[in-house]
Image (tube, rainbow, N blue to C red):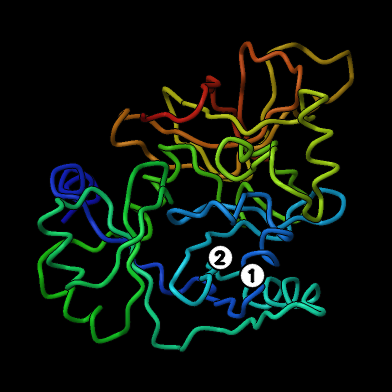
Amino acid sequence: MTEAAAYREFLLNGGIADLSDRVKLALKGADRVRYLNGQVTSNVTKLRETQSACVTTAKGRLCAEIMVTAAADALFVDADAALAETLPARLERYIVADDVELVELPSDTRLLHFLGVMPSVLEKLAGGAPLQRSRRYGIDGWDLWTNAGTLAAIRLEGVAFLSDSLLETIRIEHGIARWGYELDEETLPPEAGLERTHIDYHKGCYIGQEVISRLKSIGHVNRQLTGFISNDASLASGMRIFNGAPAGEGMEPKPIGTITSAAWSFALEKPVALGYLRRGAAIEGLVARLPGMPGVSITAQALPFVS
């Protein structure tokens, strides 16, 4: 099946994302909610469904972007696989006198995310196991924490597992930032638009709160995650962005941004990309290019591309 056909099938019948390679941790102990609430930007005390959150430094920059899920006797935390070493170390560092234990989930633990699957089918696939609502790709979905045996049984039910490349297209179309692409340890959460989904400005103290609250009161950051569309050529991660204003004689134009992720949008039938633009930069006649390559004309667009 071609990628375009798989996308059409996804729109009709939904699909399953196997997220089992993510870092999967559990926080246990009587103080787990109070402790984690003091480490992340979202309000864990009000957890009703799987919730996005940021773990930040005292300077407000990202240590990790995580998802938090409440179970009967634990909080589950999952994050990008690239954080397998740094995230547990960061969380362990602040467990001092708290009744909290941080453990890595068993190796056969599987995390599945269902997108657009009909409720009757979803119920059958879950087999009575609890499902958690989440919005990992900017659209309503459901998480299932399970084991390798259940995963094998689900694969026999006929609902398509979505490929990594198709999931990347869905992510970019919905303007979702990803660790290692739009997010890293230099990122301030508001730069990536995470204040809408990851930050509770009314909760109690957490590490980095002072800086993030100050950014809100200032009303801006120095760069902003933005969508880009090309009408004539493909786009690629790492392209630098320039505006059409000519540089001074003998001077190289200065980039005003960078593309961080790119894909072909089956919904728009055009190349699209995510990237950062410098605050206040003129956006007329934008061009994206790799060093030594011809430029590609692009247009900035508010995110998401697909609602």
Q: Check whether the beta carbons of the residues at disc 1 and disc 2 lie within 8 A of each other.
A: yes
Residue 305 rendering spot, x and y as whole percentages: 42, 29
Q: Quadrant of residue 231?
A: top left
Q: Is residue 109 above or below residue 231?
A: below
Q: In which quarter of the image is the N terminus?
A: bottom left
Q: In which quarter of the image is residue 164?
A: bottom left
Residue 195 rendering spot, x and y as whole percentages: 63, 37
Residue indicated by mark 1: 83
Could you tell me which residue is drawn at 59 percent across and 28 percent down? 295
Marker disc for residue 202: none
Disc 1 marks a residue whose amino acid type is: Leu
Q: Quadrant of the C terminus?
A: top left
Neighbour tally class for label 1: few under 14, some 14-19, many 20 plus, Cα within 10 Å? some
Neighbour tally class for label 2: few under 14, some 14-19, many 20 plus, Cα within 10 Å? many
Secondary structure found at label 1? helix
Find the residue positioned furthest to the front: 30
Could you tell me which residue is drawn at 61 percent across and 13 percent down? 285
Does residue 54 appear left or right of residue 267 in this picture? Answer: right
Secondary structure found at label 2? strand
Disc 2 marks a residue whose amino acid type is: Ala
The alpha-carbon separation of the residues under discs 1 and 2 comes to 7 Å
